[in-house]
Image (cartoon, grey):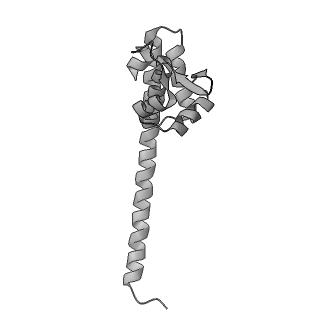
Amino acid sequence: MASLVRGEIADRERMWTIGELARECDVTLRAMRFYEAKGLLKPARDGMARLYDAENRRRLQIILRAKKIGFSLVQIRDLLGLTTSREPLEHRLTSLRDHLIRQTEQLEHLRREAEEALTAIGDEIGALDRSLAGPALD
């Protein structure tokens, strides 16, 4: 993700249709339209056709990586802001690192909660198994 925040863009002159970019990034057309509706992607228009430039391609790659990491749309919008910020690169990368650390902490918290829930479910199943194995219920 750091290279995307840095602004390293290949194929600067190339344009993609919605279908081409969706296939390249393995995302549905519906998702592409959703990201556009949320203001995360800003394609050019040629009549009814959507045309995506290299910047939109980079933004989509950030969106997809951030989604995989578990960021919300609001957090993704913040991350995309790092790509257009005029802040020094070091500041943008530090901010990205801070976002990732906070996300790691959040996911660790969710993991602990899930483990506790699984333990509680196991306890309940065990109690039910003991009840079912005991004297016949009337």
Q: Is residue 14 left or right of residue 46?
A: left
- Comparing 87 with 21, the one in front is 21
Q: Residue at x 54, y 13 (%)?
A: 85
- Residue 111 is situated, as x and y percent measured from the top left of the image, at 41, 46
* Image quadrant where residue 134 sits: bottom left
How many marks can you see? 0
- Comparing 27 with 4, the one in front is 27
Q: Residue at x 38, y 76 (%)?
A: 129
Judge whether residue 41 can be spotted in this image: no
Q: Residue at x 48, y 29 (%)?
A: 63
Judge whether residue 133 can be spotted in this image: yes
- Residue 105 is situated, as x and y percent measured from the top left of the image, at 44, 35
The vertical placement of 23 against 129, above or below, is: above
- Residue 115 is situated, as x and y percent measured from the top left of the image, at 40, 52
Q: Is residue 101 left or right of residue 44?
A: left
Q: Quadrant of the N terminus?
A: top left
- Comparing 99 with 35, the one in front is 35
- Residue 38 is situated, as x and y percent measured from the top left of the image, at 61, 31
* Image quadrant where residue 30 sits: top right
- Comparing 65 with 132, the one in front is 65
